[in-house]
Image (cartoon, rainbow, N blue to C red):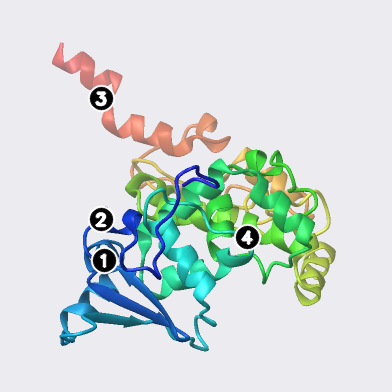
Amino acid sequence: MRRTSALRPPDYSNRKDEVLLRHGIPDTLMLCHGHQFYVHSEILCTYSPVLAVRLAKQNVDPIWGKTVRMNSSPEFGPRTPQGVVAMLCAIYPPQVAPAIELLREVDSIARELHMTLLLAKLKVGIASNESVLRDFAAAGSAVEEIPEVVLEALAEFRLEDVKAMPGYEDLPMAACVEVSRRRVALLEQTMQGHAVLRACMSAHTPFFAACPSELLRQEHRDHEVQDEEAFPGPVSRANPPWRGAAVVLSITGTGTTQRASSAGRAGTQQFGRTLRPEPEQSPVGVRRSPSSSAGGGGAAAARALSMPSSSAFSRTR
């Protein structure tokens, strides 16, 4: 989508405009606060399925033809003739990008009419035009004043690339945090659609969407301070205190032996106690060797049961 163009856009208020007639005779009248704009229903229905359903159910007026009213709403905001013209200029060739002050209204019109194709084109235009951030930063816009399409377009970049754009450093901190949050949400949504990545995400849930402590609210910070006081030592989110205290159960041929792994011993020694392997009972009819009491008794007993004795081997010979 171009920011400027040498080609003249159509004059939508003139039904006999030459540039407008290149797309055919207009058959739809768009009304906004007393202003009339002549457009083509075929082009509008290609972009908006909502308009396609609305125009299909509408009775065609013999004089005015099909009509579309652009009314203001509390959910999607006000409608102005300038915003409607900017939306039409983004649809009709040469497809000029709307101005910064009209981008929010064009974004709301596209979301109200479900114009996903127009939103995708706006994102491409914002991505190719790096001065958009500089314009919003120069205007001192808050995060509420930045259109949704701009935040979504920036979230599709890597954070390193977004930080390198001109004007990023001048944006308010709330806008930078919102871009980072949308980037994380986009990556998680992408991982949910992939089977292998979804399994990896479900297996390592604590590593995803971990908000930095400086961005948490005060009550969450108090909980973290209480956790640090309850579990002193080098504890982090990547290495929680309960991870090293896991007891590994090894199943042998004669029984179950509980043994603490090296990581488990290191983790439990931090809290003042060490897990010790419990004594194992020898199976009936098997003599326990001295070496089996020092560890690995289950494996020695399994070998004694599975291998023939020397006397039995001599009798077979």
Q: Nearer the viewer, residue 231 or 301?
A: 231
Q: Label 1 belongs to which residue?
A: 40
Image quadrant of residue 28? bottom left
Label located before the other in sequence (2 or 1):
2
Residue 89 point in image, percent of width and height: 44, 59
Q: Establish if 295 lies above or below 87.
A: above
Label located before the other in sequence (1 or 3):
1
Label 3, residues with CA under 10 Å away: few <14, some 14-19, many ≥20: few
C-alpha distance separating marks 2 and 3: 94 Å
Q: Label 2 belongs to which residue?
A: 23
Asked if labels 3 and 2 touch by Cβ distance under 8 angstroms, the answer is no
Check disc 2 and give the amino acid type.
Answer: His
Q: Label 4 belongs to which residue?
A: 100
Label located before the other in sequence (4 or 2):
2
For label 1, the SS is loop
* Eye-nearest disc, 4 or 2: 2
Asked if labels 1 and 2 touch by Cβ distance under 8 angstroms, the answer is yes
C-alpha distance separating marks 4 and 2: 28 Å
Label located before the other in sequence (2 or 3):
2
